[in-house]
Image (cartoon, rainbow, N blue to C red):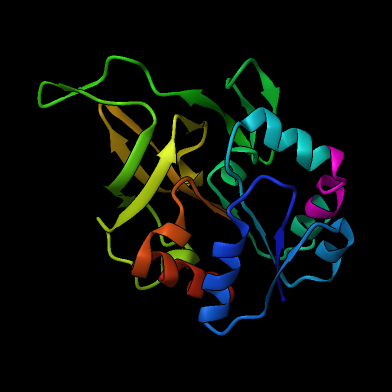
Amino acid sequence: MINIIDYEMGNLRSVEKAFEKLGFAARVSDKPEDITTADKVVLPGVGAFRDCITNLREGGFVEPLLAHIQAGKPLLGICVGMQMLFDESEEFGRHQGLGLIPGKVVRFPSGMLENGERLKVPHMGWNNISLKKDSPIFNDVADGSFVYFVHSYYCAAENAEDVAASCTYGDVEFCASLWRDNIMATQFHPEKSQDIGLQIFKNFGAL
């Protein structure tokens, strides 16, 4: 069973439908205790870091989520769900994350140019990723594949070995995906990334 955490801040149904399309048992749950009976957990996230981490903590999800990870069971974070795994975020002030991955979440600089054109923030739309190591979720995913992003803040990882894939926007190369032991995450949205996203979900479901 794949448990998709419903803490009122995520693209939940699209993720659930993607797993179901691939033949995996998945459930959206707002009950922290359901994490304890899951084989795998998905931590989605849409919106501001501050609101996401507040809802996660106040909903009582942090303790069972950490126990799931400590038990060696797979976790997939998506977008802000990946950002919350880091130490802190600078979005709307400084906010502490879960501290599972060293690094912080910072905003894209304003005034970035590409071919003489000013780049917009948020970084929104399709961009290609550069694979840095053989993360299990990238089986049968080609280097340079295009995936879908929507974010104004990005993860600056302290340790290069945590970065499974990177992406470049303007002059910033940022962590597009991380992998440490049983923790996997993407800054992009697999549920919006068509065939590549489905392959990523298939790989995670098959772990």
Q: Nearer the viewer, residue 184 or 154?
A: 154
Residue 58 in picture, x, y percent from top left = 86, 38
**Prevailing SS of the magenta stretch:** helix
Quarter of the picture containing the C terminus is: bottom right
| Rendering coords of residue 17 (x, y %) | 56, 72
Task: Report the residue that reaches farthest toward the bottom.
Answer: 23
The question of residue 111 being in magenta is answered with no
Q: Quadrant of residue 174?
A: top left
Question: Residue sitting at 54 percent across and 63 percent down?
Answer: 14
Does the rendering let one see residue 94?
yes
Q: Is 152 placed above or below 85 here?
A: above
Q: Which residues are magenta?
A: 58-65
Instruction: Name the residue located 58 percent from the left edge and 78 percent from the top edge.
Output: 20
Q: Residue 169's spot in the image, x, y percent?
A: 29, 33
Q: Position of residue 40 (x, y in %)?
A: 69, 68
Q: Residue at x 39, y 30 (%)?
A: 122
Q: Is residue 183 visible?
A: no
| Quarter occupied by the N terminus | bottom right
At horizontal 25% and vertical 28% (from top left) the residue drawn is 170
Q: Is residue 99 left or right of residue 119?
A: right
Against 48, is 183 above or below?
A: below
- In the current view of this chain or complex, which residue is farthest to the left? 115
